[in-house]
Image (spheres, rainbow, N blue to C red):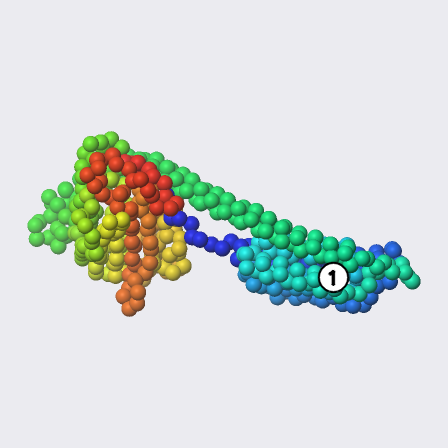
Amino acid sequence: MPRAPVAVDFASRSLRLETLVRLRWLAVGGQTVAILVVLFGLGFPLPVLPCFVLIVVSALLNIALGTRFPASLRLGTWPAFGLLAYDALQLAGLLYLTGGLQNPFSVLLLVPVIISATALAKRPTVLLALLVIALATILALDHRPLPWTRGESLPLPLVYVAGGWVALVSACLFIGVYTYRVAKEARRLATALSATELVIAREQHLSALDGLAAAAAHELGTPLATIALVAKELERELPPDSPYAEDIALLKSQSQRCRDILAKLTSMSSQGDALLARQPLSHLIDEVVEPYRTFDVEIAVETGKSEGPEPVGVRNPAIVYGLANLVENAVDFASSRVDLISEWSAGEVSVTIRDDGPGFAPGIIDRIGEPYVTTRGRAEDGDDGADGVDHEAGGLGLGFFIAKTLLERNGARLKFANRDAPATGATIKITWPRAMMDAGGAGEDRLPETMPSGTAWRAPVKSL
């Protein structure tokens, strides 16, 4: 399973500047048409110049925003609040000049509140609603006369105006709360759907890699056998004191290791009871690091903070493979040392893998575990491409993807980070609920009763 989605306040940056600019252009056009219709169509007198000054100010603000900022800019909470507050104040100014709450267009004061409730957080929405209520109160008590036929007036009873104020305030509160709740549920649903789509995409990638692994195991068998045969022939022909004897021995051992790995790929699905043996955590770590002890990197296995007896669980090849992949990556990039620190408590079991290499690149540390994202490509010895990465030695980022997916499918949470200065290198911490890594004498088929949030239980994976 992928890591739990990071809690993001979608409301804080869900409004694009272009959206508010277009809505304001719509308001400018509507206000202009309304004034012209009242002035020339109905013949009602009204303060044209002050009204058009307010409209022109809105138009100039739109032009300035469109010139200064890109249309795709997503506004933060308070910049968006400021623009919506301005819209409410500008409309209140027009209503003050044209009858206050007696003007039927006073209902448009609700628009900024509705937009805020849809896209912004609770606090700015509440502040904007209070601003609108204050403006409505001022307009109910003080305003210019409502435009009407020349020489006549249309005085409305105070009770009617008070009723309009109550209706406007009630609508502001009800629509604001209702819209905010509906938008919040929609955002939660969108978050859940995004997480589900991520899970499905990663499972599809892993399923595709299943077939690729089987095909690779079949195709690579013949050339590896040829390499092993040639290495044996060369070893037989070379004298024992030859300077190439050590290289030939290394070639033989590594080709045999490749053949052993391919054998695991093809036999995992058929292995049965042999995989159900109980295995202490220390034995699991020893099994993981054993193939890499022949490298020119020191691998130190330590036991950190521990509470209670050592976890003893059922051997899971998916966990072994996932940890081995992470250890191999650490060995590849380490300068001289890799540390594996195991810790356990009554509720959790963790393994920390730490190296003294260059560390993760800052630009991709949040994307580690996605397919085809390489983790720490670095040019060395001048054999680099134009972008400073040794493409021949670099990978496709699938190792981390497979390891992370396999471990998370078995209840683990992974945290990637760089070591604190002045130390260099990367740190990977893998944490499981203790129930996942400790049979606890309850039987080999015991499943955990609870799982961490965002993690679904799966049976141990027996094939890649």
Tell me if residue 55 comes above or below residue 211 in the rendering: below
Mark 1 surroundings: few (<14), some (14-19) or many (≥20) residues within 10 A:
some
Q: In this view, does 433 lie to the left or right of 454?
A: left
Front residue of 325 and 434 = 434
Q: Is residue 382 above or below residue 322?
A: below
- Looking at the rendered image, the quarter that the C terminus falls into is top left
The residue shown at (82%, 63%) is: 145
On the rendered image, what quadrant is the N terminus found in?
Answer: top left
Q: Is residue 346 visible?
A: yes
Q: How many labels does the image show?
A: 1
Outermost residue, right side: 151
Q: Which three-letter amino acid code belongs to the residue tagged 1?
A: Ala
The residue tagged with tag 1: helix, strand or loop? helix
Residue 415 in the image: state x and y as whole percent. 33, 54
Asked where in the image residue 81 lies, by quadrant, the reply is bottom right
| Residue 140 appears left or right of 334 | right
Q: 165 above or below 272?
A: below
User: Is any atom of residue 39 visible in this view?
Assistant: no
**In the image, residue 236 above or below residue 6:** above
204 and 457: which is toward the camera: 457
Residue in the picture at 8% in, 53% down: 241
Residue 299 location (% of width, % of height): 19, 55
Q: Mark 1 points at which residue?
A: 140
Q: Give the percent coordinates (x, y) of residue 156.
A: 81, 57
Q: Residue at x 69, y 55 (%)?
A: 166
Please state which of residues 367 and 98 is positioned toward the viewer in this rendering. 98
